[in-house]
Amino acid sequence: MAGTRGYVNRRLHSLLGVIPIGIFLIQHLTVNFFATRGPEAFNAAAHFMESLPYRYVLETFIIFLPLLFHAIYGVYIAFTAKSNLSNFGYFRNWMFIFQRITGIITLIFIAWHVWETRIAIGFGWAELNYQLMEGILTEPFFFWFYIVGVISTTFHFSNGLWSFFVSWGITVSPRSQKIMTYASIIIFLAISYVGVRTLIQFAYGI
Amino acid sequence: MSENKTITMIITRQDHPDESSYEEKFEIPYRENMNVISALMEIRRNPVNADGEPTTPVYWDMGCLEEVCGACSMVINGTPRQSCTALVDQLEQPIRLEPMTTFPVNRDLAVDRSRMFDSLKKVKGWIPIDGTHDLGPGPKMPESKRQWAYELSKCMTCGVCLEACPNVNSKSDFIGPAALSQVRLFNSHPTGEMNKSERLQTIMDAEGLMGCGNAQNCVQACPKGIPLTTSIAALNRDTAVESFKSFFGSDQRV
Ligand code: HEM
Ligand code: SF4
Ligand code: FES
């Protein structure tokens, strides 16, 4: 893509990864974490989100459209890279490849996850409550599918945050980039804990 | 002691830009303090391969022989680098020589790096001072800035950073780190700075700055130790400000 359009698309892709998708991710994991306080707490939190005013506008402009753009353009970016880890096994090169692999895994995971929750609820095939997720996650295959999907997403977001800071020229010096690497590792561990802890709650009730 | 010692080299060869490549093995007599170029010269003196068959001499490019021109770059045991500073004693044998894959092969190890010079033209990698009359002395440069700008000016357009980049490949038009860093160099110069925004505009597209995916191999691979990823991040900042100014501001138009 030549000219300004290619530039704007790339800037938009980078921005949308954090605002709003990244912020939505944190919010989503946080609301789900209510499950660790029991089914009632989860249901109350989920129903609060469900009953937000102009919900379809929020869903469309904060979640669906940004995610769709980021995902489609992300697949294009991912497939224009050519891995050369065998000759250049540096840490950042690994992160570069992981960013692309986790992008693809996250896409598959989100597509399935949205299908069996939001779309199923939209069609009236399912109801949004604790039992819906309990039903899915007590099946061992889906428990592990969700574990992989959630960790892939949290990795993609945390490492993406690191590259976001470079892409917008916030971390320019090697030292600031290094400190941001440590910060992104801490963010990865923290939000992975929140996500995985919630999955264990749904699957094992503990 | 070193009388009968030999060096084994496996060289990827190609007779013509349009023909496919093949490997040829050579055994050459060892001498002390050889570099890859003196080993190649040995083959040129006696073009016989390891099977004892006469062959054509291996072709390669060179210029300065002191790692400042970049012409002799090739992939040595998997690593793109200059063959003039690749010492045989420090290399694992057999020594594998391949042309860099980023560029079209002219013949054997010699590649055509025209795309790098085209990129320098694209980004206006110069300072326009030609005119019809003497413009007088330009503004002075602070010493602290001169020091880091000097580091950027060491680039010899060798192509190693493009070879190391996972986003520079046949599926993408990314111009690579070298030309980007030159934008930062010329923008840092007090006279060059007068065309700063013009130069930034040349890299604000998907083939320019936006082609970078932050794998940061380039900065590890550059033989001149140029802080390429710092340059790229700095340009990310400059272009973000530039887009903001050109969209909301009126710096470029009345
Ligand atoms: C929960 C969903 C997602 C979040 C929170 C997210 C977040 C991010 C963030 C913050 C970045 C960094 C942007 C930058 O470098 O400036 C990024 C980059 C990227 N994302 Fe996503 N992303 C998500 C889903 C996806 C999906 C589904 C794909 C599809 C494959 C994808 C592909 C990519 C790619 C390839 C990059 C690298 C861009 C580059 O470095 O040039 N992402 N993402
Ligand atoms: S930046 Fe370094 S690796 Fe790249 S062309 Fe210049 S000297 Fe070679
Ligand atoms: S001959 Fe000039 S860099 Fe090797």
Image: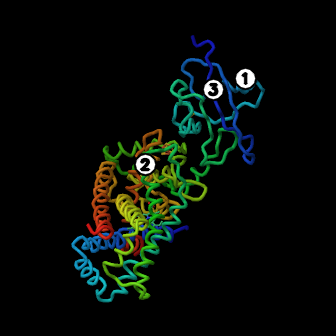
Please give the residue where the numbered disc 1 appears in the rendered image.
B46
Residue for point 46% across, 62% down? B198
Q: From the viewer's perspective, is residue B81 above or below residue A38?
A: above
**Image mark count:** 3
Q: Quadrant of residue B12?
A: top right
Q: Where residue B242 sits: x, y (%)?
A: 39, 66
Counting residues from the start of the chain, the first of labels 2 and 3 encountered is 3
Q: Nearer the viewer, residue A111 or B239?
A: A111
Local crowd at mark 1 within 10 Å, few (<14), some, or many (≥20)?
A: some
Q: Which mark is residue B228?
A: 2
Mark nearer the N terminus (2 vs 1): 1
- Disc 1 versus disc 3: nearer the observer: 3
Question: What chain is tagged by disc 3?
Answer: B
Q: Left or right of A181: which side holds B134?
A: right
Indicate whether A53 appears above or below A172.
below
Secondary-structure class at tag 1: loop
Residue topped by disc 3: B8
Residue type, numbered disc 3: Thr
Q: Residues within 10 Å of mark 3 (few under 14, many from 20)?
A: some
Measuring 41% from the left and 59% from the top, which residue is drawn there? B194
Disc 1 residue type (three-letter)? Asn
Q: Is residue B238 visible?
A: no
Gap in angstroms between the C-alphas marked 2 and 3: 35 Å
Identify the subunit bearing mark 2: B
Mark 2: amino acid: Leu
